[in-house]
Structures are given as structure tokens and as C-alpha cells.
Image (cartoon, grey):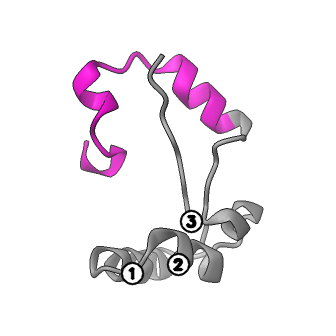
Amino acid sequence: MAQATARHILVDSEAKCEELKAAIEGGQDFAEVAKQHSSCPSGRSGGDLAHSALARWFQSSIPWSSAEKSTRFSAL
């Protein structure tokens, strides 16, 4: 069975979101940015949602095609 992973960074403003997005697109490591800036407890693990209920639902509920399974979600 194919597996999906999910990570996120929770911030309190769209401006901060855009700032961090630009930093990540500029080459900063997503996990490090999450550790430094996320207000979600998952930030401590680099924004990893692997063991959360959301990640389990995400993986089991969405009918992914084989192409989508091999594509980064942000690229969809």
C-alpha cells in the first residue's frame, strides 16, 4: 500500500505564511522552519503529521492515482 506523508506549519497571519513560504522556496529546510515558527505542537517534529488523525484520514480517504502518489502535494 502506498503511503502519504503530511507536514505543515501553523502561523497566525497570511503575511507570516507568505514569508515562510518564500524562505522554503528559497532553499530553507521545511522541517527547520516548522521547528522555529509553527505554533502547532507538530512543529517540534518539523511539522510532521504522520501519527495524527488528520494524516490517517488523509491517507485513507482520498482516492489517489499512482501519479498523484508520487507527486508532492504542493505541486498538485
- Identify the element where label 2 is drawn: helix
Q: Is residue 13 magenta?
A: no
Residue designated by label 1: 28
* Residue 5 versus residue 21 in the image, above or below: above
Q: Earlier in the sequence, mark 3 or mark 1?
A: 3
Query: Would residue 22 be found to the left or right of residue 67 on screen?
Result: right
Give residue 33's mark. Answer: 2
Q: Are marks 3 and 2 in contact (CB under 8 Å)?
A: yes
Say what amino acid the circle numbered 2 marks. Answer: Val
Q: Which residues are magenta?
A: 54-76
Q: Earlier in the sequence, mark 3 or mark 2?
A: 3
The quarter of the picture where residue 23 lies is bottom left
Q: Is residue 38 left or right of residue 6?
A: right
Tag 3 secondary structure: loop
The CA span between labels 2 and 1 is 7 Å
Q: Nearer the viewer, residue 62 or 66?
A: 66
Task: Provide the residue designation for mark 3.
Answer: 9
CB atoms of marks 2 and 1 within 8 Å: yes
- Mark 2 or mark 1, which has the lower sequence index? 1
What is the magenta segment's predominant secondary structure? helix
Residue 36: horizontal and vertical position, in percent?
62, 83
Q: Residue furthest right?
A: 41
Q: Amino acid at mark 3?
A: Ile
Q: Position of residue 72 (x, y in %)?
A: 32, 46
Residue under the image location 77 percent in, 64 percent down: 41
Q: What residue lies at 32% left-to-right and 51% top-to-bottom?
A: 74
Up/down of 41 relative to 37, above or below: above
